[in-house]
Amino acid sequence: MLFGSTNQGQLFCLDARTGKTLWMDETPRDRSGFTCTVDVGSALMALPSNSQLIVYRPVGSGFTELASLKVAETPTTYAHPVAAGNRIFIKDQESIILWTIN
C-alpha cells in the first residue's frame, strides 16, 4: 500500500500493484499542496506545508485520526518530520522544533 495526500489535503491509500485507490479522506482540510508522510510504526504522520501535523492509523478501508495539531509558528514547513522514540522534530522556515509525546 502507498499512502499520501492530494494537493487538496485529502489523505489517500493506493494499491501499489494495481494503482487502484483503496480509500480517500473526505474530511475538509486546508489546501496544503506539499505533504510529507512518514511511517512511525503503529501509525502514520502526515505533515502538510501548512504546518498542521496529522497522525493517523490505517484501518480497513479508511483510517482513524489520532491527532491533529499545529506544530510550527511559520506559515510553511517543507521538511519531513522526524520521529525518535517519544520525540518529533519539525523543521520550519526558521528553526527546528522538538515535540515530546507523553
Image (spheres, rainbow, N blue to C red):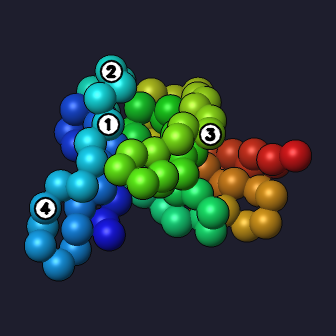
The residue at 53%/41% (across/down) is 64
Q: Position of residue 52 (x, y in %)?
A: 50, 32
Between circles 4 and 2, the one closer to the viewer is: 4
Q: Earlier in the sequence, mark 3 or mark 1?
A: 1
Amino acid type at circle 2 is: Pro
Q: Earlier in the sequence, mark 4 or mark 2?
A: 4
Real-space Cα separation, disc 3 to disc 4, in angstroms: 25 Å
The residue at 79%/66% (across/down) is 85
Real-space Cα separation, disc 2 to disc 1, in angstroms: 8 Å
Q: Earlier in the sequence, mark 3 or mark 4?
A: 4
Observer able to see residue 47: no
Real-space Cα separation, disc 4 to disc 2, in angstroms: 22 Å
The residue at 32%/69% (across/down) is 1
Between circles 3 and 4, the one closer to the viewer is: 4
Amino acid type at circle 4 is: Lys
Amino acid type at circle 1 is: Asp
**Secondary structure category for the residue under label 2:** loop
Res 25 label: 1
Observer able to see residue 31: yes
Residue at label 2? 28
Residue at label 3? 66
Real-space Cα separation, disc 2 to disc 3, in angstroms: 16 Å
Real-space Cα separation, disc 4 to disc 1, in angstroms: 15 Å
Q: Which class describes the residues within 10 Å of circle 2: few (<14), some (14-19), or many (20+)?
A: few
Q: Position of residue 75 (x, y in %)?
A: 45, 27
Residue at label 4? 20
Q: Earlier in the sequence, mark 4 or mark 1?
A: 4
